[in-house]
Amino acid sequence: MAKKITIALVGRPNVGKSSLFNRLIKKRKAIVDATPGVTRDRLYGEMEWEGRAIAIVDTGGFLPPDEATPILPQVIIQCQKAIVEADVIIFMTDVRTGLTPIDVEIMKYLRKTQKPVLCAVNKVDGEKQLQDLSEFYALGVEKIWPISAIHGHGIYELIDEALTLVSAEETKEEKIPSMAIKVA
């Protein structure tokens, strides 16, 4: 069996990271609440998809500086640790709030990590929300993944793409020739 992969769920508060986490692991392990800042530490869960073991990491939400709380630095540290551990990052935002300056800042940060990033726009529950997706292309991504964590729409296509990205990275690593060093 191939090695377990790790997917980190990253984004601002209340975009549905914990709802997606619970949906993927098929348990109510993460607290879901409308109050920003409920998730503070990394939370780990397991799932299997297409014969592949996957660790899902739920993270607390990044907050803009004007909304910062004394807890914010710890939340950011936990998010950064999850990003370092991740093979793939799912950057989540939501269609109801729309694209925000903090979304743009988070995406800039994630690009610097050199890790594969998928942009999932949550709370897409109908045709109206599908029409509102175009603004998210301002993040500079090739594809937007419309999902509904609550209803389960689009989430497994998103996980399929995460596995495709990991497989591509593994294939790249296998093709790197080993170098024999001879000592005279």
Image (spheres, helix red, strand yellow):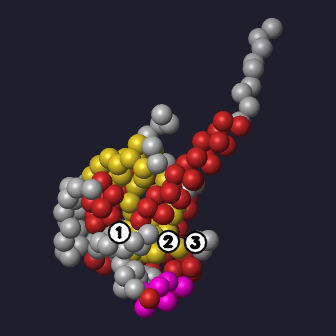
Which dot marks residue 145?
2
In screen coordinates, is 34 left or right of 81?
A: left
Q: Which one is in front, 114 or 175?
A: 175
The three-letter amino acid code for the residue at tag 3 is Lys
Question: Residue at horizontal 72%, vertical 27%?
Answer: 178
Question: Residue at horizontal 43%, vertical 91%?
Answer: 128
The residue where tag 3 is placed is: 143
Using a 10 Å C-alpha cutoff, classify the residue at mark 3 as few (fewer than 14 neighbours), some (14 to 19) or many (20 or more): few
Q: Is residue 132 magenta?
A: yes
**Residue 140 percent location from the top left of the image:** 60, 74
In screen coordinates, is 24 left or right of 49?
A: left
* Mark with earlier residue (3, 1): 3
**Residue 169 percent location from the top left of the image:** 61, 46
Question: Residue at horizontal 74%, vertical 31%?
Answer: 177
Q: In the rendered view, would you say 130 is above or below 122?
A: below
The residue where tag 1 is placed is: 152
Quarter of the image with the C terminus is: top right
